[in-house]
Amino acid sequence: MNSDPFTRMRRPVKSTAAGRESAEREIEKVGKRVQVSLKRFERRGSTARNRALREVKKTRTRVERELRQRRNSAVRTVKQNRRQAERQVKSARREFEQRVTSLV
């Protein structure tokens, strides 16, 4: 559906302070679009309302799934970075201890 007002919000948002502000503005825009759509569907019949409810559920599910994926990706990256840093510290400590023992 090209006329879906929710597909326009699929741009990735930077994770900076400016990114947070733009994300908040994006959320406000989506909220306004939802309000306008809701008013329009309130004036129409039950078929239009049911269609709107289906679309809302579908969109909510998609957004929640994307958030879970992003969160899991961030957690995975943090764990990988922590493991890598711990390995580097461990090898540096081992190398230092070998140099000290070779000097003594």
Image: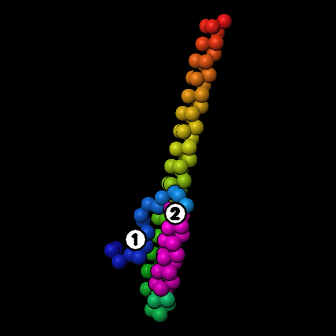
Please state the horizontal and vertical placement of residue 21, each as a whole percent of the image: 54, 67
Query: Residue at the spot x=47%, y=93% of the render?
Result: 43
Q: What's the magenta bit mostly, secondary-structure-wise?
A: helix
* 26 vs 69, nearest the viewer: 26
Label 2: which secondary element: helix
Query: Which range of residues does the magenta coloring cover?
Result: 19-38
* Label number found at residue 18: 2
Q: Nearer the viewer, residue 63 or 8?
A: 8
| Extreme residue in the left direction | 2
| Above or below, comparing residue 8 to residue 65 in the picture | below
- Whether residue 78 is visible here, answered yes or no, is yes
**Which residue matches tag 1?**
8
> Who is closer to the viewer here, 49 or 59?
59
On the image, the x and y values in percent for residue 96 come to 61, 18
Determine whether the residue tagged by mark 1 lies in a helix, strand or loop. helix
Amino acid beneath label 1: Arg
Task: Tell me whether the residue at label 1 lies in contact with that at label 2, contact meaning CB atoms closer than 8 angstroms.
Answer: no
